[in-house]
């Protein structure tokens, strides 16, 4: 696709920031990043639950591609704030799809492993969804609404998304580094299994989808399947901490509001064969993230202090 105009929603979130970064490196794109608040220069404010504004923006900007990186991502809060979670994760996706259909844009949307119940793992694109949390249900509703509206779409399901970015919400890796650097004793579950995914890598997959004009559903995650505890052990090693303050636990002891799929591991063969998706090891991705944090002055490997 040449000279594409690309509208990016949720552009100041973790994935949104990485998508902006990755697409900026390519000369063929003109970017229109937006989020709830307008943030940095060149960004504009768009609440995707405002149908009229969504339609107006797409009409005015005439993007050839819309990348929806916006979402209500707090899984536990989604159990309580159901109306808002549904608006952002389902209704707003319908509005974006309607606008895309009206003005001839492609819609690239991000979904989640939480559409599965996690009883068996190794899910592929043909596996039957069965969400066990309101967040998962709202994300599945978003996928279904999108499919009903639009032909030119791609849905990328991902999981255990982590990475470093300016002002991003605390993800699993940042949480573990924070605990270790404060030398606080903490518990990590051994019974939740999945494929950690560096947001920078997911953004590259989004670029591949756009450049190849791919359509349909793709699983896009890291290729290694680890328990959260094993993942945390790798975080400790890469960031240079003693893991002794970290103790194994189980999900039932956490008392979280939302149920989690226990094993939501992915098979990503479709993305590998059709998109040429490759993924570094979890350890290499963590080294990459550590380096980003060092360069940004957010982590000092010598003093092991999170700044
Ligand atoms: N994080 C994970 O582990 C994970 C796992 C699987 C799939 N995913 C999916 O991956 C995608 C990206 O996740 P992420 O971790 O990058 O999320 P994130 O950091 O929470 O970013 C989401 C962005 O969407 C914005 N947003 C929320 N409501 C909005 C609205 N009504 N209109 C416009 N923007 C709105 C948020 O703004 P505010 O910050 O101001 O609310 C935030 O900037 C999402 O679709 C998510 O469901 C994430």
Image (cartoon, helix red, strand yellow):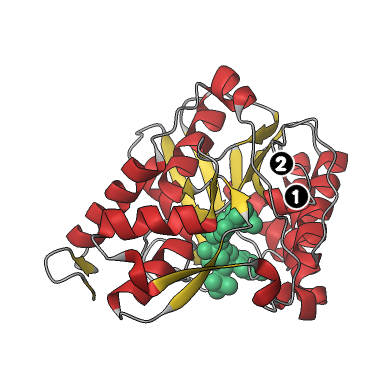
Q: Residues within 10 Å of mark 2 (few under 14, many from 20)?
A: many
Residue at (76, 47) in percent of width and height: 97
Q: Which mark is residue 128?
A: none
15 on left or right of 304: right
Foreground residue among 127 and 181: 181
Residue located beneath label 2 in the image = 121
Foreground residue among 84 and 119: 119
Residue located beneath label 1 in the image = 118
Foreground residue among 148 and 183: 183
Position of residue 253 measured from the top left corner of the image (x, y, whole percent): 66, 76
Quadrant in which the C terminus is drawn: bottom left
Instruction: Work out whether residue 47 can be spotted.
Output: no
Foreground residue among 6 and 299: 299
Q: Residues within 10 Å of mark 1 (few under 14, many from 20)?
A: many
Position of residue 287 measured from the top left corner of the image (x, y, whole percent): 28, 48
How far apart marks 1 and 2 lie (CA) works out to 6 Å
* Ligand 1 is within 8 Å of the C-beta of the residue at disc 2: no
Check disc 2 and report its element: helix, strand or loop.
loop
Residue 189, located in which quarter of the rendered image?
bottom right
Check disc 1 and report its element: helix, strand or loop.
loop
Residue at (31, 79) in percent of width and height: 183
Position of residue 111 measured from the top left corner of the image (x, y, whole percent): 68, 49
179 on left or right of 56: left
Q: Ligand 1 falls in which quarter?
A: bottom right
Answer above or below: position of 162 versus 208. Answer: below
Instruction: Work out whether residue 232 can be spotted.
Output: yes
Residue at (53, 38) in percent of width and height: 206
Q: Answer yes or no: do the residues labelled 1 and 2 have beta carbons within 8 Å?
A: yes
């Amino acid at each position: 696709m040449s000279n594409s105009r690309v509208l990016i929603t949720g552009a100041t979130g973790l994935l949104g920031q990485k998508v902006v970064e990755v697409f900026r490196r390519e000369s063929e794109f003109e970017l229109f990043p937006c989020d709830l608040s307008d943030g940095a220069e060149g960004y504009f404010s768009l609440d995707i639950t405002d149908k009229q504004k969504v339609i107006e923006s797409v009409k005015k900007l005439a993007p050839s591609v819309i990348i929806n990186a916006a979402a209500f991502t707090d899984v536990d809060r989604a159990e309580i704030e159901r109306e808002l979670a549904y608006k952002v994760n389902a209704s707003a996706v319908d509005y974006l799809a309607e606008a895309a259909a009206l003005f001839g844009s492609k819609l690239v949307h991000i979904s989640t492993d939480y559409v599965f119940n996690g009883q068996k793992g190794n899910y592929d694109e043909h596996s039957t969804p069965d969400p066990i949390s309101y967040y998962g249900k709202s994300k599945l509703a978003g996928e279904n609404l999108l499919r009903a509206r639009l032909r030119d779409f791609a849905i990328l399901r991902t999981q255990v998304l982590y990475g470093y970015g300016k002002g991003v919400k605390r993800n699993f890796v940042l949480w573990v580094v924070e605990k270790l650097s404060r030398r606080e004793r903490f518990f990590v579950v051994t019974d939740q299994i999945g494929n950690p995914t560096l947001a920078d890598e997911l953004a590259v997959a989004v670029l591949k989808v756009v450049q190849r004009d791919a359509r349909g559903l793709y699983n896009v995650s890291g290729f290694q399947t680890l328990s959260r505890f094993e993942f945390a052990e790798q975080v400790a090693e890469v960031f240079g901490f003693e893991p002794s303050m970290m103790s194994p636990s189980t999900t039932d002891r956490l008392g979280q509001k939302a149920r989690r799929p226990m094993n939501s591991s992915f098979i990503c063969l479709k993305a590998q064969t059709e998109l040429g998706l490759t993924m570094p090891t979890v350890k290499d991705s963590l080294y990459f993230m550590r380096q980003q944090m060092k360069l940004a002055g957010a982590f000092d490997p010598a003093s092991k202090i999170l700044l």
